[in-house]
Amino acid sequence: MQHIMVYITVENMDEAQMLGKELVSSNLAACANIHRIDSVYRWGCKIVEDKEVVLILKTISEMFDELKETVRSLHSYDLPCICWNISGDEDYLQWVSDETRKL
């Protein structure tokens, strides 16, 4: 079992809270952290500066595909940022395992 941290950006706090609650309540993630951020990115030929919200999820790799599809189905962006990878403290990762739905 590989533990992962999934990084997702969303448009606003309401969307982040909705996604976080959905993913944790469905046991696709053990925990969701939500933070306001300033983003600078290229979209087409323009440099865009935006206020966004980042959602950081702790889960296991076996849940990633279902988590990703759930996020895509609920996300407001045409092309949502959904990135992952983590290693970390064994006790904390055990908690993530315990709180994440088993296959």
Image (cartoon, rainbow, N blue to C red):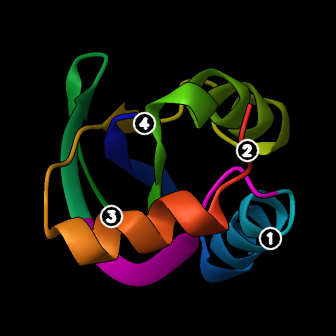
Q: Nearer the viewer, mark 4 or mark 2?
A: 4
Q: In this view, does 21 lie to the left or right of 64?
A: right
Q: Which of marks 3 and 1 is in front?
A: 3
Q: Circle 3 sits on which residue?
A: 93
Q: Circle 4 sits on which residue?
A: 81
Q: Which amino acid does label 3 sit on?
A: Leu
In the rendering, at what x and y percent does residue 70 appear? 78, 36
> Is there a contact, CB below 8 Å, between mark 1 and mark 4?
no
Q: Is residue 55 left or right of residue 67?
A: left
Range shown magenta = 27-38
Counting other residues with Cα less than 10 Å from the Cα at mark 1, is it few (<14), some (14-19), or many (20 or more)?
Answer: few
Cα gap from disc 1 to disc 4, whole angstroms: 16 Å
In the rendering, at what x and y percent does residue 81 appear? 42, 36
- The quarter of the rendered structure image containing the C terminus is top right
Q: Which amino acid does label 4 sit on?
A: Cys
Q: Circle 1 sits on which residue?
A: 18
Residue at image location 46% in from the left, 74% down from the top: 95
Cα gap from disc 2 to disc 1, whole angstroms: 12 Å
Counting other residues with Cα less than 10 Å from the Cα at mark 2, is it few (<14), some (14-19), or many (20 or more)?
Answer: few
Counting other residues with Cα less than 10 Å from the Cα at mark 3, is it few (<14), some (14-19), or many (20 or more)?
Answer: many
